[in-house]
């Protein structure tokens, strides 16, 4: 290239990137963003229409471009164009945040990016990334020759280096969060940490040395722990790419040795949103195909175990729609139930309390007695699902577990407690909002809450065989009825004896709870047979939770339709192909809301499946012509119009008079003194005159 061409190129470059060709942005006016992508790079040009010399003029604000990365070269055209849009919005956000703008592209598919029904992994992340611009952004399609500015930028893009303002570091993949859940927690860094951890553990370090070049050192092998030595002698360990693998009859999985990495695997295999906090057995099955360490079964049980002390795991729920009560006109109360001792706490409150009000209520009234909770189980109430509530408990180290829609069994402990408390309140307030005692003092429902809470705490629970206060505190509170028992002998047990007594009580309670669980499971399984479904079966679905179905809900069938099963989600849920009136409903149902479809035998009952005959509507469109009024009658001084009898109409049809579409004057009924044959003769004469 000659020196003159280089100078001309630099002049054009300077003119394009400086005034007056390059405009200053006006934040009151909308922007235009031209984007284009090709196999070499990405390009974008930000324009704006401004008034220059009293005429509208569209000029550039800035230009950006970069070369694509090796991993992006495999993208198809649609993915490449969407990548260019997301990249341009990220780099030009200081222009576009809060501004109205139009995105112009030569690829028509990009218009459906925001509303794509079945996006792949990349499209889903890009959809989330541009949601903040949804209200202000409009995507339009124009032919490629209209916006050659961005087309040229993409074909001769600047190198992806730190000097480029649009530089994106290689390997920098931002983690996207959906509802506070990290999608990519385990990445390449995890495997690097696994390799580095082998140097810190004695057994793994020895295994790495033994497996390197197939070393046969018996003394070195004997220095390992027994469980590692036994697995090594059975040929269960293998090394590949610096990572140790354990081979079993189920799978070949990597070996972990430090607690931090083990906790990461436990978290991903149980707490992840896509694994659904499944049972202990299912979590073990998942761990078995991911990783191995000597005490993995014990660690899974401890990670998933039931609470061993009071107030580790609690259930929470609200009761609303109550009449105002108390000095502050409370109209709701919050129920907190300890899962271990079944001890409840009832807190009167207001139904319009915010998440902050609820947090302060628990902090001021509960935490000082129970300490911080390890796990809170609740429904998906907006207060419990709010960002403030979730972030607060994240800071406190409390895990939040939400129940599934239409599946109250998840939070069954609080639901049952609410039902019991409501029954207790109804005993006193069933005949009025206030209750008058024997001393003529009046009380509302809010006044009874402390006494009812104490009464429930001191009652015997069927599952544990003990009262709640004994399991929670180790002693029984004194009640008014205890004054009738006289003075009791205080044995003054020693501290060690009291501790031993409390351990025995809790051990007995654990055994009683296990027996109660087994008994309840046996009774349930005996009377409830889970139906077996397979893909392709026809099933009707329950309309119990559908509120917008046409027609009166009381007259609707409890089960409706014949829908095909599309997929099975374990043994407790099915996914069906809905159609018609139910097409917009969620397609996944628990097995309790569906049933097997049974059709009638066409040979035995041939008429059941036939469509009933439709009765044609009466033709009332034609008006009849009145020819003549033959006679009138007065009944008790009032005019009364007589009607035809069935016999008269039949005779008229037989004589062909009824077919002429005349409205025969309503004459006389059967009790008339005029004979029927005379009347018909007169009608015949009238018809002859008419013709």
Image (cartoon, rainbow, N blue to C red):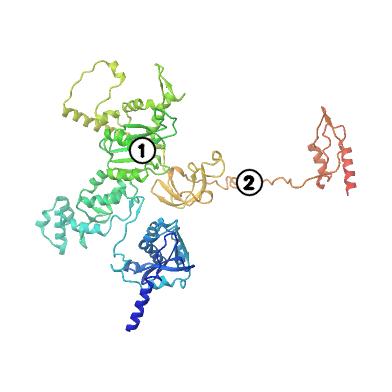
Image label count? 2
Query: Marks 1 and 2: CB-CB under 8 Å?
Result: no
- Report x, y in % for residue 233: 16, 55
Tag of residue 38: none
Element under disc 1: helix
Horizontal relation, residue 565 to residue 161: left or right: right
Spatial separation of the CA atoms under disc 1 and disc 2 = 60 Å
Residue 306: percent from left, percent from top:
28, 39
435 to 330, vertically: above or below:
above
Reading the image, the residue beneath label 1 is 357
- Tell me residue 476's x, y (percent): 27, 25
Residue 583 in picture, x, y percent from top left? 50, 51
- Where disc 2 sits, the SS reads loop
Q: Is residue 7 left or right of residue 654?
A: left
| Position of residue 651 in the picture relative to residue 408 (left or right) | right
Density class for disc 2 (Cα within 10 Å; few <14, some 14-19, many ≥20) is few
Residue carrying label 2: 612
Count residues near mark 1 (Cα–Cα under 10 Å), then give few for <14, some for 14-19, many for 20+. Answer: some
Tell me which label, 1 or 2, sits earlier in the chain: 1
**Discs 1/2, front:** 1
Nearest the viewer among 642 and 316 is: 316
- Is 244 rendered above or below residue 659? below
Closest to the observer: 579 or 63? 63
């Amino acid at each position: 290239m000659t020196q003159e061409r280089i100078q001309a190129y630099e002049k054009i470059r300077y003119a394009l990137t400086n005034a007056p060709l390059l405009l200053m942005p006006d934040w009151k006016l909308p922007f235009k963003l031209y984007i284009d992508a090709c196999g070499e790079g990405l390009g974008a040009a930000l324009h704006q229409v401004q008034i220059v010399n009293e005429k509208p003029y569209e000029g550039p604000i800035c230009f950006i471009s970069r070369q694509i990365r090796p991993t992006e070269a495999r993208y198809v055209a649609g993915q490449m164009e969407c990548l260019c849009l997301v990249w341009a919005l990220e780099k030009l956000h200081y222009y576009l945040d809060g501004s109205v703008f139009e995105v112009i592209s030569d690829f028509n598919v990009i218009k459906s990016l925001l509303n794509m029904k079945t996006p792949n992994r990349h499209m889903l992340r890009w959809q989330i990334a541009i949601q903040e611009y949804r209200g202000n952004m409009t995507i339009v399609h124009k032919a490629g020759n209209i916006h050659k500015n961005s087309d040229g930028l993409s074909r001769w893009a600047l190198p992806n280096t730190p000097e480029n303002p649009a530089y994106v570091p290689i390997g920098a993949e931002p983690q996207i969060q959906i509802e506070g859940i990290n999608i990519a927690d385990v990445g390449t860094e995890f495997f690097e940490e696994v390799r580095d951890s082998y140097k810190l553990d004695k057994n793994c370090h020895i295994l790495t040395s033994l497996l390197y070049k197939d070393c046969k050192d018996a003394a070195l092998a004997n220095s390992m722990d027994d469980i590692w030595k036994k697995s090594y002698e059975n040929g269960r360990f293998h090394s590949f790419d610096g990572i140790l693998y354990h081979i079993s009859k189920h799978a070949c999985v990597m070996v972990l040795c430090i607690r931090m990495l083990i906790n990461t695997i436990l978290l991903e295999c149980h707490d992840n949103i896509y694994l659904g906090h499944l049972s202990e057995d299912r979590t073990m099955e998942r761990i078995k195909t991911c990783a191995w360490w000597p005490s993995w079964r014990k660690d899974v049980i401890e990670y998933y175990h039931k609470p061993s002390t009071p107030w580790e795991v609690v259930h929470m729920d609200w009761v609303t729609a109550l009449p105002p009560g108390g000095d502050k006109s409370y109209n709701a109360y919050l129920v907190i139930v300890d899962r271990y001792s079944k001890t409840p706490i009832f807190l009167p409150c207001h139904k319009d309390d915010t998440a902050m009000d609820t947090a302060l209520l628990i902090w001021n009234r509960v935490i000082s007695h129970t300490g911080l909770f390890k796990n809170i189980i609740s429904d998906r109430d907006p207060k419990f699902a709010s960002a403030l509530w979730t972030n607060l408990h994240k800071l406190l180290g409390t895990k939040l577990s939400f129940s599934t829609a239409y599946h109250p069994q998840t939070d069954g402990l609080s639901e049952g407690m609410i039902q019991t408390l409501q029954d207790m309140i109804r005993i006193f307030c069933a005949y009025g909002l206030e209750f008058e005692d024997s001393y003529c003092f009046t009380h509302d429902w809010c006044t009874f809450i402390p006494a009812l809470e104490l009464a429930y705490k001191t009652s015997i629970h069927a599952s544990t065989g003990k009262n709640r206060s004994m399991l929670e505190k180790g002693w029984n509170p004194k009640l008014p009825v205890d004054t009738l028992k006289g003075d009791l002998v205080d044995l003054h047990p020693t501290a060690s004896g009291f501790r031993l007594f409390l351990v025995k009580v809790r051990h007995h309670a654990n055994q009683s709870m296990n027996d109660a669980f087994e008994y309840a499971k046996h009774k349930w399984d005996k009377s409830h047979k889970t139906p077996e479904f397979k893909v392709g079966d026809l099933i009707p679905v329950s309309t119990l939770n559908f509120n917008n179905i046409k027609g009166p809900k009381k007259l609707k069938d409890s089960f409706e339709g014949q829908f095909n099963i599309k997929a099975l989600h374990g043994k407790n849920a099915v996914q069906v192909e809905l159609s018609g009136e139910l097409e917009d409903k969620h397609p996944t149902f628990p097995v309790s809301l569906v049933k097997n479809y049974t059709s009638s035998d066409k040979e035995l009952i041939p008429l059941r499946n036939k469509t009933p005959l439709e009765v044609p509507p009466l033709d009332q469109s034609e008006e009849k012509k009145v020819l003549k009024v033959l006679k009138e009658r007065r009944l008790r001084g009032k005019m009364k119009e007589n009607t035809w009898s069935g016999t008269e109409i039949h005779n008229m049809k037989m004589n062909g008079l009824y077919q002429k579409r005349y409205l025969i004057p309503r004459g006389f009924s059967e009790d008339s003194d005029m004979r029927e044959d005379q009347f018909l003769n007169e009608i015949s004469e009238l018809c002859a005159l008419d013709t």
